[in-house]
Amino acid sequence: MQLLDGNLCAEQIRQEITQKVDAIKASGQRAPHLAAVLVGNDGASENYVAFKVKDCAQVGFESTTIRLPDTVTEDELLAKVAELNADDGIDGFIVQLPLPKHIDENKIILAIDAKKDVDGFSPVSVGKLNLGLPTFISATPNGIMELLARYKIETEGKHCVVLGRSNIVGTPMAVLMSRNTNPGNATVTIAHSRTKNLKELCLSADILIVAIGKTEFVTADMVKQGAVVIDVGQTRVPDTTKKNGFRNVGDVDFDNVKEKCSYITYVTGGVGPMTRASLLQNTLKAHQAR
């Protein structure tokens, strides 16, 4: 078993981006600028945005965090999105999800200018992805593709099972793995909680990508010997033995599954850092396009 080190690969990506940003500044241009809109005080979202700010500082990006109360109205948030769309000093921005229940997330996503949609969630980005056209790719799937590429994991002709069908991870992941690219050229099955014979299907996977949002859902008896397992899930569960009172648990029962894998990610230091690195790549792309 070899651990897929997202921290290591993300650091490589940040170093590559830093070199490009240094060249941009040397040419007299301004640095890329990423903004993040954070609504409310969700702990996980707070941490994630804080990491993004740190990442931007490391590679030489400008960054702005816009904090809004969880009482913000949908119209007020839409007005802020319109303001960011029109700001020529910002190359890309994200509205951190999830949003409060009184706000329609789809309406917010639809309002983001596709040229600044560095999260890759807009219909334009999704449509171009499905057509195989250059676009912003959703950061988590793109990060997983980078991880596979940098570890030179063979995907052509392999059976890839994507467990989860969200528009953010599962569906774009399946598209990317099936495309005529490297990594890619896999035979892909999308499965979910209502899939029949789910255990048997997972056992047939050479590559198993798990984004189902259920802690330790994938157990050792669901994994083929020698499979590649990518765990996208991350859930905080109470743990009195930890100083902060919780620990992060993935969608895969790591301790028992790892013994059957050729490669596997861990809940921390795996997919998460690659997601953040992909967001930086998209922001650089947005800056170059402008």
Image: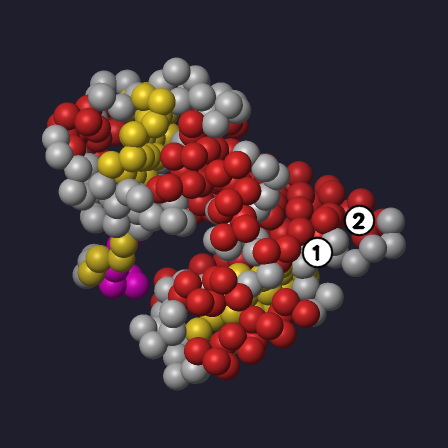
Q: Nearer the viewer, residue 256 or 81?
A: 81
Magenta segment range? 243-249
Tag shown at residue 195: none
First in sequence, mark 1 or 2: give its number.
Answer: 2
The answer to whether residue 139 shows anywhere in this view is no
Residue topped by disc 2 = 24
Tell me if residue 290 comes above or below residue 172 in the rendering: below
User: Dot 1 surroundings within 10 Å: few (below 14), some, or many (20 or more)?
Assistant: many
The answer to whether residue 247 shows anywhere in this view is yes
Q: Secondary structure at mark 1?
A: loop
Residue topped by disc 1 = 32
Residue 87's spot in the image, x, y percent? 69, 69
Residue 30's spot in the image, x, y percent? 79, 58
> Do the residues under discs 1 and 2 have CB atoms within 8 angstroms?
yes
Q: CA distance from mark 1 to mark 2?
A: 9 Å
Q: Picture quarter containing residue 195? A: top left
Q: Which residue is at a point 30% across and 63% down the rendered structure image?
A: 244
Residue 54's spot in the image, x, y percent? 57, 58
Tell me if residue 266 comes above or below residue 221 in the rendering: below
Q: Nearer the viewer, residue 53 or 80?
A: 80
